[in-house]
Amino acid sequence: MTPEQLYDILAAYARSQGIRLNKDKELVMDIMRGLLTNEQRYGYRSCPCRLSWGDREKDKDISCPCVYRDPDIKEYGSCYCELYVSPEWNEEKIEHRQVPERRPKEKRRMI
Amino acid sequence: MGKPKIRLFTLSTCSHCNKTKKFFQDNGIDVEFTDVDLLSGPEREKIVEEVRKLNPDVSFPTICIGDTIVVGFNEERIRKALEACA
C-alpha cells in the first residue's frame, strides 16, 4: 500500500469517528510512511513516534490508532503524534500544545 | 561560548524527529543524530540508557543543546537553548 492510499483510507476513517487527520499534509504523509515502515518491519502499525518492542502483544496499546488517542484528543485536541485531531484543532479554535506521553512507563520500551 | 555540541536522539519513523532534523539543517546547524530504532543489541541498550539519563521518559526526539535538554520538536525552546549557547 502506498502512503497516499493509506492517507485516503485513514482520512475517511477519521471522519467516520468524528475526528480528522491533521491538516498539515506534509507531516501526515511523513507519518503515513512511518506507519507503513513499521508495518513492514514488525507486521503491525506500531506508533512511529514511539520506540517499538517489535512484539505485537507488548505493543498492542500503541498499535495505531493507539489506545491513548481518544483521551489525548479529548484533553489536547490531538493525539501524541498529531496525526488524529479534533475538527476544532484543525480550525485553530484551540491552542496547539505538545501532547505529553500518556503511555504508562512500565509499558514503554526502555531497553 | 561558540558553537554548542548538539546531539539528537530520534526515531527514523517519527515525523516530529524529521521536523527537528530539518529545522537544524535549514538553519545550517551541524548536529549529530542517532536513530534509535535502527540500532539493535548491546549498542541499542547503551544508547537507550544514555537517553534515559537525559530524558527519563525515553521519548523522542530528545534534543541536547549544550547542557539544555529539549524533548519533542518545540521550536521556541530550541531557539532559546541555542541563544543561551551563542
Image (tube, coloured by chain):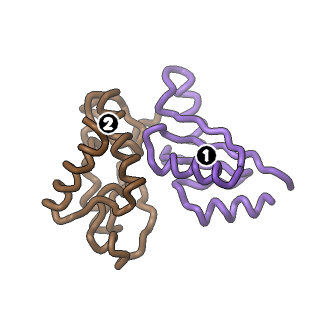
Chain colours: A brown, B purple
Residue depicted at x 61% and y 43%: B8
Drawn side of residue A57 relative to residue B22, left or right: left
| Marks 2 and 1 close (CB-CB < 8 Å) | no
Q: Residue furthest top?
A: B41
Q: Is residue B55 left or right of residue A103?
A: right
Residue identifier under label 1: B54
Residue A80, given in percent of the width and then of the height, sits at 37, 55
Label 1: few (<14), some or many (≥20) within 10 Å?
some
* Quadrant including the C terminus of chain B: bottom right
Q: Amino acid at mark 1?
A: Leu
Q: Residues within 10 Å of mark 2 (few under 14, many from 20)?
A: many
**Secondary structure type for disc 2:** helix
* Residue A107 visible in image: no
> Percent from the top left, x then y, of residue A87?
26, 70
Locate the N terminus of chain B and report the quarter of the image it occupies: bottom right
Question: Does residue A20 sit above or below A6 in this rendering?
Answer: below
Residue named by callout 2: A36
Indicate the chain on which mark 2 is placed.
A
Give the Cα separation between the discs numbered 2 and 1. Answer: 30 Å
Q: Is residue A96 above or below residue A39?
A: below
Quadrant in the rendering for residue A60: top left
| Amino acid under disc 2 | Leu
Label 1 marks which chain's residue?
A: B
Residue nearest the observer in this picture, A75 or B3: B3
Residue at 55% over, 61% down: B74
* Label 1 secondary element: helix
In this rendering, the count of numbered labels is: 2
Instruction: State the image coordinates of residue A11 (x, y, percent, origin top left).
Output: 22, 55
Query: Residue A9, percent across and down?
Result: 19, 48
Q: Are marks 2 and 1 on the same chain?
A: no
- What residue is drawn where x is 43% and y is 39%? B13
